[in-house]
Image (tube, grey):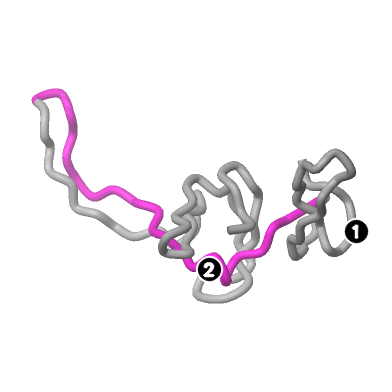
Amino acid sequence: MKLKKGDTVVVIAGKDKGKEGEVAQVLPSENKVIVSGVNTAKKHQKARAANQQGGIIDRDMPIDASNVMLVHKGKPTRVGYRTNSDGTKVRVAKRTGEVIG
């Protein structure tokens, strides 16, 4: 999977198209990512402890990785890989050819 936790992505398809957010969790076995502030759902939560409050909370749900695109230097870009001369594999922005840090 070409996305990692902490990457900034933009949604390119679906009900949240155009929204930007940070990848909070990556689920490679399902090819999904959880992006903060995107694809939220209401969850009815019961108070478990005496000091914890119950109620309706917003929860970020997984979105398919094909529906998001990495943002590099303010613009959406595809991600590729390159092997350096010392043998390390790095992610590369296809738009600019620069290494993604």
Does 11 sit above or below residue 37?
A: below
Name which residue type carries label 2. Answer: Asp
Query: Was residue 42 drawn as part of the magenta stretch in this picture?
Result: no
Q: Residue furthest top?
A: 51
Q: Which residues are magenta?
A: 50-72
Pick the quarter of the image with the N terminus.
bottom right
How packed mark 1 is, by other alpha carbons closer than 10 Å (few <14, some 14-19, many 20 or more), is few
Secondary structure at badge 2 equals loop
Residue 39 picture quarter: bottom left
Report whether 36 appears left or right of 30.
Answer: right
Residue identifier under label 1: 96
**Disc number at residue 16?**
2
Name which residue type carries label 1. Answer: Thr
Q: Position of residue 69 (x, y in %)?
A: 66, 64
As measured in the structure, the alpha-carbon distance from the residue carrying label 1 to the one carrying label 2 is: 26 Å
Q: Nearer the viewer, residue 73 or 3?
A: 3
Contact (Cβ within 8 Å) of mark 1 with mark 2: no
Q: Residue at x 18, y 46 (%)?
A: 45
Q: Residue at x 38, y 58 (%)?
A: 61
How packed mark 2 is, by other alpha carbons closer than 10 Å (few <14, some 14-19, many 20 or more), is some
Does 43 sit above or below residue 63?
A: above
Query: Was residue 52 drawn as part of the magenta stretch in this picture?
Result: yes
Pick the quarter of the image with the C terminus.
top right
Q: Residue at x 19, y 52 (%)?
A: 44
Does 44 sit above or below residue 78?
A: above
Of mark 1 and mark 2, the one earlier in the sequence is 2
Q: Residue at x 29, y 57 (%)?
A: 42
Q: Position of residue 92 (x, y in %)?
A: 80, 54
